[in-house]
Amino acid sequence: MLRTPSRVAFLVAGLMLSTAALADTMVPSVNLFDPLSVKFKEGASAVAFLDKCVERLGQDKELVLKVSVHADERYGMLDNTYLAHERSKRLEKWLKRHGAKKKQLVFEAVGHTGVENTSTTAVVTFSFSDGGNVAWPGKG
């Protein structure tokens, strides 16, 4: 099967390979979640950002938001994958509760093992199907 650059970008977790992917919003996990937890950070920035994502989805019913949740704050692949999976479920629940439609949401949990906790491995990536993005409103 022939893969276009945009498909490759979605298949390679967390790597920004296509021009559309360059518009993705990468939010450090610490701006959305408490450390080693699925609990959302207390603060207006996280809620404001997620509200903007829901608003953008509401403007175009054909738009799809792919959310890739990366976690490497724990040691071991199973722990990391579990944490990423639980965080992705938490985000999905929040977005749907606030107006996003299930058909507009795609989630991916990416666990890392044996890597240092960095700005590219401990992030949540928000990718809109039209290549647009929603900017983070400020510091976490």
Image (tube, rainbow, N blue to C red):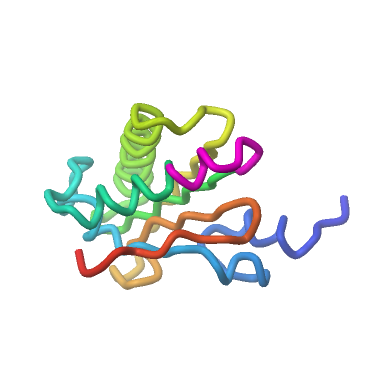
Direction from residue 4 to residue 58 in the image, left or right? left
Q: Nearer the viewer, residue 37 or 57?
A: 57
Expressed as whole percent of the image width and height from the top left, the position of residue 85 reads 38, 39
Expressed as whole percent of the image width and height from the top left, the position of residue 113 reads 37, 59
Q: Residue at x 64, y 71 (%)?
A: 17
Q: Nearer the viewer, residue 53 or 113?
A: 53
Q: Quadrant of residue 137?
A: bottom left
Tell me the quadrant of the picture where the C terminus can be found: bottom left
- The image shows residue 74, relative to residue 65, as above or below, that is below
Q: How many marks?
A: 0
Expressed as whole percent of the image width and height from the top left, the position of residue 133 reads 51, 61
Expressed as whole percent of the image width and height from the top left, the position of residue 55 reads 44, 44
Q: Residue lying furthest left in this view?
A: 42
- The image shows residue 105, relative to residue 120, as above or below, that is above
Direction from residue 6 to residue 54 in the image, left or right? left
- The image shows residue 38, relative to residue 48, as above or below, that is above
The answer to if 14 sits in the magenta stretch is no
Q: Quadrant of residue 37?
A: top left
Magenta segment boundaries in residue numbering? 55-63
Q: Residue at x 47, y 51 (%)?
A: 68
Q: Residue at x 75, y 65 (%)?
A: 5
Direction from residue 36 to residue 110 in the image, left or right? right
Direction from residue 4 to residue 63 in the image, left or right? left
